[in-house]
Amino acid sequence: MRRISWMLAMVLVLSALLAACGKKDAAAVVKDLNEVVGEMESYQGAGVMTLHTGETPQQYKVEVWHQKPSYYRIALTNAKKDVTQIVLRNDEGVFVLTPSQNKSFRFQSDWPDNQGQVYLYETLIRSITGDTTRQFADEKESYVFDVAANYNTHALVRQKIWLNKSDYAPKQVEVSDSNANVVVDVKFDSFKFGAEFGKDAFDMQRNMTAATEEGNKTGTDADAAPAEKTDDAAGQQPANPQATPGSEGTGGAVDGQTGVSEGTDQQGTQGTEGSASEQGNEKPTLAEPKESDSFGVIQPTYAPEGVKLKDDQILEEAGDYSVLLRYEGTYNYTIFEARPQDRAVSLAPSRLVDLGFTAGMISGDALQTLTWTFDGVEYRITSADLPENEMVRIATSMHEESGK
């Protein structure tokens, strides 16, 4: 009997050792993640991002492409309104595109090196490897990290990241506030390392025209892999746009101080006057901008403590409809709303700011302005004393509000 008990104990110990074999601790996984990022050439991911910043959760389809050394394409589509905005980085700079309205802003920036997004793989891994107080869990099919959130708002404090055990691809991300409430949730439907892209996948003009040509399926032809979308007979070439300033899609040389193309006085936009037509190519057919019809008065649901609305004015000049809201108190600022038209307006030096549902641009020094567009309306928050994180909170509280 004693012999049987001893043998049973040995079997149990051996089983435990076998079960533990192959398990990794946090240090081993972090080491692997550093190697994955170091060897990574490209990736393509898609999923759904849910923002819990308003009364009703808002969902956005997210598609992200990355190709070394520094090419990025992020497409955010409002699931309810089917409006897509694209953040693009190539050799010519950083672009924020709204193809359906024929709007493109360009500026010089080191994004996303200076500020990442929750759906960018490098940002997630940097958060994991950089947090020495990270928490780690080994679940059935995932490694789970709970780490500090490093984004451009104090409202986001912690984030929980699920990685696939087999290849360390991201599966889900939850970003929470100081009360442990989930503010942003991203669930990846697919994620592929080593993706191959067509030669024009990161070209600005191609991304602007493809939405119109293919029903908002930008960057590639419908229902085909990215690498298969190329006019090159050789096919399947990785994206490597080597265009120099003044080549196709740029509209001229970039002014590094302002981000405005020389030779154009548009608002950092390329419109239908891009260099593709200047070089003899057929002018692309793009969507006409919406008319400046009334959209009411769109008010933010958030205001900093000690701030109240002073007044609002509806401005209707030369057929244009716009709104001006003035706030005063602890901070003083104005909010301007209008349907953008193709106007000759200079663009001040600016940098990209992640608003979650879209990308905004901060410009100015002593007097700062946050500019973004959503559902055909352009918004500008201007202030001499309002902190940037408060600007972002105000902006995010407006994105699903309707005019009153």
Image: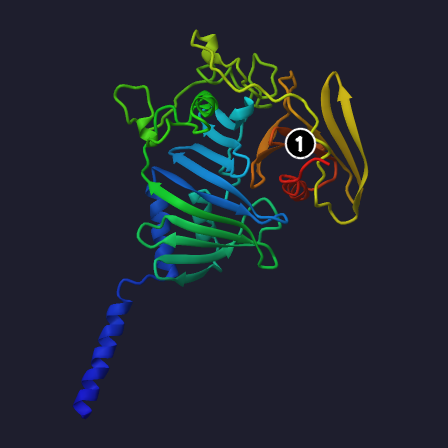
42 in relation to 138, above or below: above
Q: Residue at x 35, y 61 (%)?
A: 140
Disc 1 on helix, strand or loop? strand
Q: Residue 115's x, y, as percent? A: 53, 40
- Quadrant of the rendered image containing residue 197: top left
Q: Residue 126's x, y, as percent? A: 45, 48
Residue furthest bottom in the image? 1
370 in relation to 173, above or below: above
- Quadrant of the rendered image containing residue 340: top right
Coloration mode: rainbow
Left or right: residue 251 compared with residue 201: right
Q: Residue at x 44, y 37 (%)?
A: 63
Q: Residue 227's x, y, as percent? A: 32, 29
> The disc labelled 1 sits on which kind of residue?
Tyr
Whether residue 104 is visible here, answered yes or no, is no
Q: From the viewer's side, name the closer residue of 63 and 79.
A: 79
Left or right: residue 321 compared with residue 240: right
Residue placed under numbered mark 1 in the picture: 379
- Classify the position of the C terminus by image quarter: top right
